[in-house]
Amino acid sequence: MRFHKFIAVILAVLFSFTALAGDWKTRYLKDAFGDSDYSKPVYTVDLKGTTDVVRKGESCTLGFMVHRSGDSVLMRAFLTRNGHQNFWTDTHCYVKLANGKKFAISCSAEDGDLWFYLNSKELSAVLDILNNGNFTLAITSRSMFGDVMNCTFIVGSQTTGIKKLLGAR
């Protein structure tokens, strides 16, 4: 009987954590020897979406990473579509909330990945959006040759719980 109660408690704890933490996975930065540094967790989530790089509606995945470094929070995203797909230099990121409100998020494409360099007000707003979930993320990227790539990600609860994971202040 004790064993059954123990299993029930473990399942309740796991269920509670999952509900609070969306689909975030914990990974760790490596030290100079290649060993995991468990004091430096990086939280990642894969967002499924569509792009029109080759044909409209083609599936893609946005790998989104969040990491706390002291008082700073670093955010980076990379796109996969049949392998790694680079974001071009002229890239813009937009969010539409469930209530229809739309706005832009500051970002910069570097080495093909998307980095979010946010001031404290922007960071707070973005963390709130991720934490609450239920939004649409749109990314437009233009090459210097005029090619345009549009990506759309409809996000439900996958990003919820990030503030708790980060120990947001």
Image (tube, rainbow, N blue to C red):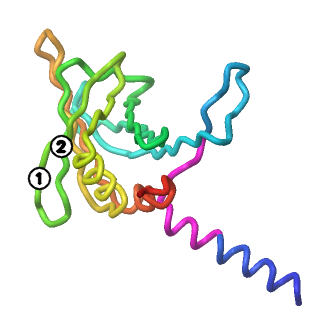
Dots 1, 2 in contact, CB < 8 A: yes
Which image quadrant: the N terminus? bottom right
Task: Report the disc number at residue 94.
Answer: 2
Name which residue type carries label 2. Answer: Tyr
Helix, strand or loop at label 1? It is strand
In x, y percent, where is residue 147? 15, 17
Residue with the mark numbered 1: 102
What's the residue at 51%, 69% (across, down)? 19
Q: Is residue 26 magenta?
A: yes
Q: Is residue 135 magenta?
A: no
Q: Give the image quarter of residue 117.
A: top left
- Would you call the spot at circle 1 few (<14 residues within 10 Å), some (14-19), or many (20 or more)? few
Vertical side of 43 occupied by 128: above or below: below
Vertical side of 147 occupied by 17: above or below: below
In x, y percent, where is residue 77? 38, 34
In x, y percent, where is residue 23? 49, 55
Q: As drawn, which residue projects farthest toward the front?
A: 71
Q: Is residue 14 left or right of residue 86?
A: right
Of 104 and 169, which appears nearest the observer? 169
- Would you call the spot at circle 2 few (<14 residues within 10 Å), some (14-19), or many (20 or more)? some
Q: Which residues are magenta?
A: 14-27
Q: As drawn, which residue projects farthest toward the bottom?
A: 1
What's the residue at 60%, 41% (across, down)? 27
What's the residue at 34%, 19% (across, down)? 112
